[in-house]
Amino acid sequence: MKAALVGPDGELLHEARRDTGRDRGPDAVVASILDFADALRAHGLAEFGEQAAAAGVAVPGIVDTEKGVAVYAANLGWSDVPLRDMLTARLGGTPVALGHDVRTGGLAEGRIGAGRGADRFLFMPLGTGIAGAIGINGVIEPGAHGSAGEIGHVVIRPGGIPCGCGQRGCLERLASASAVSLAWAEASGDPEADAADCARAVAAGDPRAVAVWQEAVDALADGLVMAVTLLDPRTLIIGGGLAEAGETLFTPLRAAVEERVTFQKLPTIVPAALGDTAGCLGAGLLAWDLLATEVSA
């Protein structure tokens, strides 16, 4: 878990990390979050003479932001956890905003990171899977049921590799960091090889690595062009582990997207700027937005 105290303009005042404790079960994870939030409140009081005016928390899985409930998170074993109410109670009535981890990170990237100034953007982290956050005028669009932006489960190669979602040929099975790791481990014959190793091999000119990498880039470009056609973003922000390859990814990706567009307006494709602090900063922005909403109400 990553946490921070965040100022009104998004400045990072204090940052801390703790283990989730998920090996001790889902209830232990909730307890860890509550303890962590309490510790941050105490730090704010000791360091700045006042506790945080509001709190924001971002969690994975399916999130009902209106009700403040973590509906489902497979990797944490959660089901219908009323996290907002639990945090509010633990923090003595402090108002709490609950968000989805990728959409919250996208909020930060859009407002104060790589998408600053863009009225329409799409944030896509390429990690274990692929998700997306659709930004419109500084706000993330959650969708009617809280699942907007699940671009990783758009079918790019019909009948292709089975995906855990039940479909075949999903984008994240072809172009995520984990997908590249699996493909390169097989191609190289090294079961320990990962996407970072593949990127280094590409830079060194290894033809096996180039083939694996190009397959992922082509799939990603197909997915991005689909997104551009539907959403018409001004900026595409690419983050996550695969983006750490830098221009080894971005140079061929920009070329592949440009080759595919016809009538669509080509967006700017940029790397994410905030790294693994995006979630913390985004949670802070959720908290400040909550305060602004309460004041205006």
Image: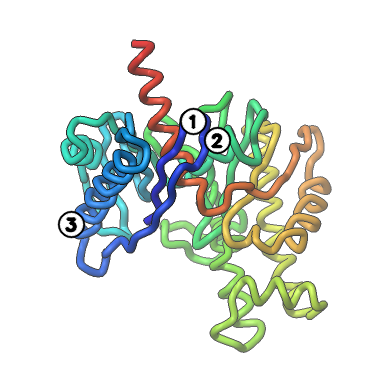
In the displayed structure, 236 sits above or below 172; it is above
Q: Secondary structure at mark 2?
A: strand
Let me know if residue 148 appears in the view. yes
Q: Amino acid at mark 3?
A: Asp
Crowd band around label 3 with a 10 angstrom C-alpha radius: few (<14), some (14–19), many (20+): some
Residue 247: quadrant of the picture: bottom right
Q: Amino acid at mark 1?
A: Glu
Task: Please report the residue visible at 36 percent of the width from the left and 23 percent of the height from the top.
Answer: 291
Which one is closest to the eye, mark 2 or mark 3? 3
The label on residue 134 is: 2
Asked if labels 3 and 2 touch by Cβ distance under 8 angstroms, the answer is no
Coordinates of residue 271 in the picture (x, y in percent): 68, 49
- Which callout, 2 or 1, points at the residue further toward the start of the chain? 2
Residue beneath disc 3: 27
Q: Amino acid at mark 2?
A: Ile
Q: CA distance from mark 2 to mark 3?
A: 32 Å
Task: Please report the residue visible at 55 percent of the width from the left and 27 percent of the height from the top.
Answer: 138
Coordinates of residue 266 in the picture (x, y in percent): 78, 37
Asked if labels 1 and 2 touch by Cβ distance under 8 angstroms, the answer is yes
Let me know if residue 103 appears in the view. no
Q: Secondary structure at mark 3?
A: helix
